[in-house]
Image (cartoon, rainbow, N blue to C red):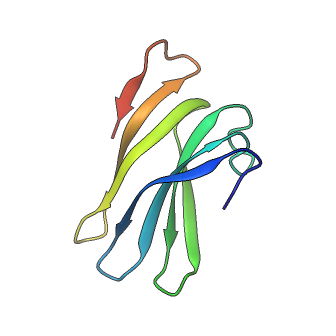
C-alpha cells in the first residue's frame, strides 16, 4: 500500500468471514488522491490475503482515522478527526 512519505496503520478489525479491515493515515500522495496533505483510508483484505478494495476518506486536508470496526452483518464504522481545506478547527467524523 505505501506512499513516498509515511503510511501507517492506525487501527484494524476482523469480520465474521475472517477479512481484515485496515485503517491507515498517509502523508502525501495516497495513491494520487491526496497529493499534498494527510489522508486516510480503509482497505479490506480477505482471509486469503487478496486486497478487495480501498476507500479513501475525507476532503483534501488532514484526516486521521482513529478506529474502524465491523458489526455482525458486515457494516463498517470508521471514526476519526478532520481538518479539511475549508475547516478552520479540527472536527470529528463517524
Quarter the N terminus occupies: bottom right
Residue at position x 55%, y 16% from top? Answer: 86
Is 77 on the left-hand or right-hand side of 41? left
Residue lying at the far left of the rendered structure: 72
Residue under the image location 58 percent in, 74 percent down: 51
Q: Is residue 76 visible?
A: no
Determine the residue positioned at 34% across, 83% down.
17
Q: Is residue 25 left or right of residue 70?
A: right
Q: Is residue 26 above or below residue 74?
A: above
User: How many marks on residues?
Assistant: 0
Residue located 54% across and 55% down the image: 55
Q: Is residue 81 above or below residue 19?
A: above
Q: Which of the two residues, 75 or 89, is positioned nearer the viewer here?
A: 89
Query: In the rendered view of the protein, which quadrant contains the C terminus?
Result: top left
The residue sitting at the bottom extreme is 48
The picture quadrant where one finds residue 28 is top right
Q: Is residue 1 left or right of residue 59?
A: right
Across and down, in percent, residue 62 comes to: 55, 30
Q: Quadrant of residue 40?
A: top right
Residue 23 x %, y %? 47, 55
Image x and y of residue 26, in percent: 62, 45
Q: Is residue 71 above or below residue 65?
A: below
Q: Is residue 21 visible?
A: yes
Amino acid at each position: 500500500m505505501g506512499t513516498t512519505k509515511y503510511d501507517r496503520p492506525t487501527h484494524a478489525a476482523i469480520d465474521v468471514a475472517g477479512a481484515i479491515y485496515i485503517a491507515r493515515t498517509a502523508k502525501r500522495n495516497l495513491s494520487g488522491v491526496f497529493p499534498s496533505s494527510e489522508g486516510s483510508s480503509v482497505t479490506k483484505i480477505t482471509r486469503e490475503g487478496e486486497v478487495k478494495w480501498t476507500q479513501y476518506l475525507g476532503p483534501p486536508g488532514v484526516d486521521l482515522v482513529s478506529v474502524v470496526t465491523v458489526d455482525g452483518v458486515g457494516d463498517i464504522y470508521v471514526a476519526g478527526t478532520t481538518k479539511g481545506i475549508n475547516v478552520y478547527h479540527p472536527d470529528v467524523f463517524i
